[in-house]
Image (tube, helix red, strand yellow):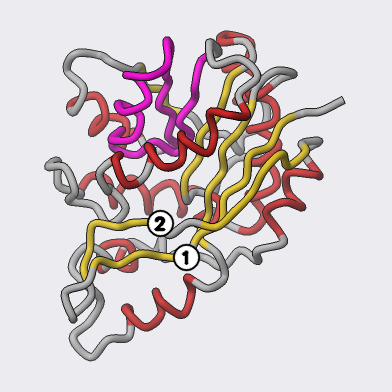
């Protein structure tokens, strides 16, 4: 099983058109207000910080490069070749490595795990973008990457984000400029019930070690000039005997 060709092509189209400059994409916020906050919540639960860190759904690699300054081996993985091209161009020094990966495809995560061993995984705002039938296989792939010692930090938009996005999309002036391409390419955020995420983790054999709520900062602004922040929930999970 792998992602649908429509879904893959939607992401390819989005990233082919996406600007290269930092902050040009709706969710491409400065790591100081994204990955740094998440890492402070994640680090206390790492059983082995020396494991490779996989940034799953890395996009253009902004958060990946932040992690590469803090972990010995960081791999940015994405199912879009155009996204990986963005990430590599933005990282001429090769701080991280980048891999084309469809984590929903059966065996893909196991293959990467065979190469890297147990890994820690960071995934921000990917699950809600997936087709519903792909969500459990994606979390199963994360479990395969973790192995016995890895930990995952998973942050997703909460149910409360949907009316916020809906209001922005239906604004009389149209959606904000950085949000419009997401809808245009058919990758509008889907709805994942708040209680579905821990259920996906449990089904994958993972135990939630910690969880909480934190606004997900974007690079876009509302018509009144305030920065758009979307309600989100985070979980740290691992395989616990």
- Magenta residues, start to end: 52-79
Quarter where residue 115 is shown: top right
Q: CA distance from mark 2 to mark 1?
A: 6 Å
Give residue 185's mark: none
Q: Is residue 135 above or below residue 157?
A: above
- Residue 199 lies left or right of residue 72; in this view the side is right
x and y percentages locating residue 119 in the rendered image: 59, 19
Give residue 231's mark: 1
Residue placed furthest toward the right = 241
Q: Nearer the viewer, residue 212 or 117?
A: 212
Please give the name of the residue rendered at 17% of the width and 17% of the height, measured from the top-left corner: 92
x and y percentages locating residue 86 in the rendered image: 23, 33
Q: Which residue is mark 2?
A: 216
| Numbered disc total | 2
Q: Are marks 2 and 1 in contact (CB under 8 Å)?
A: yes
Residue placed furthest toward the left = 21
């Amino acid at each position: 099983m792998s992602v649908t060709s429509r879904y893959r092509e939607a992401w390819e189209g989005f990233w082919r058109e996406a600007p290269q400059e930092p902050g040009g994409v709706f969710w491409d916020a400065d790591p100081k207000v994204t990955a740094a906050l998440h890492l402070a919540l994640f680090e206390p639960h790492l059983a082995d910080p020396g494991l490779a860190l996989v940034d799953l759904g890395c996009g253009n690699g902004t958060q990946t490069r932040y992690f590469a300054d803090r972990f010995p081996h960081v791999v940015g993985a994405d199912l879009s070749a155009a996204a990986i091209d963005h990430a590599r161009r933005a990282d001429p020094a090769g701080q991280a490595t980048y891999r084309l990966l469809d984590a929903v495809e059966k065996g893909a995560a196991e293959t990467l795990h065979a190469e890297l061993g147990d890994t820690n995984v960071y995934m921000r705002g990917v699950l809600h973008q997936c087709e519903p039938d792909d969500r459990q296989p994606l979390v199963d792939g994360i479990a395969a990457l973790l192995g016995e010692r890895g930990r995952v930090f998973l942050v997703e938009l909460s149910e409360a984000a949907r009316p916020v996005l809906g209001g922005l999309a239906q604004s009389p002036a149209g959606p904000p400029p950085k949000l419009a391409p997401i809808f245009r390419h058919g990758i509008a955020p889907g709805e994942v019930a708040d209680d579905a995420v821990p259920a996906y983790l449990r089904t994958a054999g993972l135990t939630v070690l910690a969880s909480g709520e934190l606004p997900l900062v974007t690079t876009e602004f509302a018509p009144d000039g305030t920065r758009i922040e979307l309600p989100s929930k985070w979980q740290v999970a691992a395989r616990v005997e």
